[in-house]
Image (tube, rainbow, N blue to C red):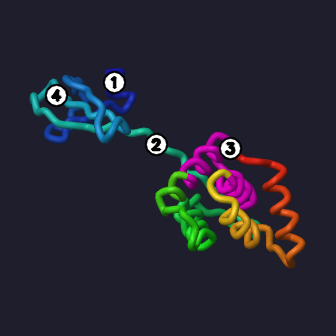
Amino acid sequence: MLAASLGAMRCPVCVQADTRVVDSRSADEDTCIRRRRECGQCGHRFTTFERLEEIPLIVVKNSGERQPFDPRKIVTGLLAASKGRPLTEVDFEGLAARVEERLRHQGSETTSEAIGLAVLDELGRLDQVAYLRFASVYKDFENIDDFEREARLIKVEPRS
């Protein structure tokens, strides 16, 4: 009866909680576990899937608004900043995934500022021209001195 009190998997036919796992294997490129179960009451066999429940990464905007992290926003911004550069959408999808992973290691919430800085850090490793273009919008450059200062920073801090 302990299994029933813990919310055991119920048979979809007779609704009894007396089921047992007869086979388990990974599925969906190792993102979940597929389990074949058998009801101890009626003998019906059925399949269940066990998946990791990801906690959404929440972005706290400068206005205080909160919204789910959307890697497509990074990709879209980078595509605009890199027009004419030898970079692809796939490059930016990988960059966005690395940024998301880095931010998730810091907690379930982040700020738009932290995202921008992480994007700049990753972008500087890919393409310095795209970096300067993105930085000019992100850091709100007002004149040529801002470009020169940022260009000097890139040269001083070579990225691997």
Residue 150 figure quarter: bottom right
Residue at numbered disc 2: 53
Q: Earlier in the sequence, mark 2 or mark 4?
A: 4
Q: Nearer the viewer, mark 2 or mark 1?
A: 2
Q: Earlier in the sequence, mark 2 or mark 3?
A: 2
Q: Give me the disc on residue 66.
A: none
Q: Which three-letter amino acid code belongs to the residue tagged 2?
A: Glu
Residue at numbered disc 4: 38
- 130 and 6: which one is in front? 130
70 relative to 13 in the view: left or right: right
- 28 and 130: which one is in front? 130
Establish if 100 lies above or below 75.
above
**Distance from Cα at disc 4 to Cα at disc 1:** 15 Å
Residue at numbered disc 1: 3
Residue 60 figure quarter: bottom right
Labels 2 and 1 touching (C-beta < 8 A): no
Residue 15 place in picture, x, y as percent: 20, 38
Q: Give me the disc on residue 160.
A: 3
Q: Which three-letter amino acid code belongs to the residue tagged 3?
A: Ser
Q: Residue at x 62, y 50 (%)?
A: 99
Q: Is residue 152 visible?
A: yes
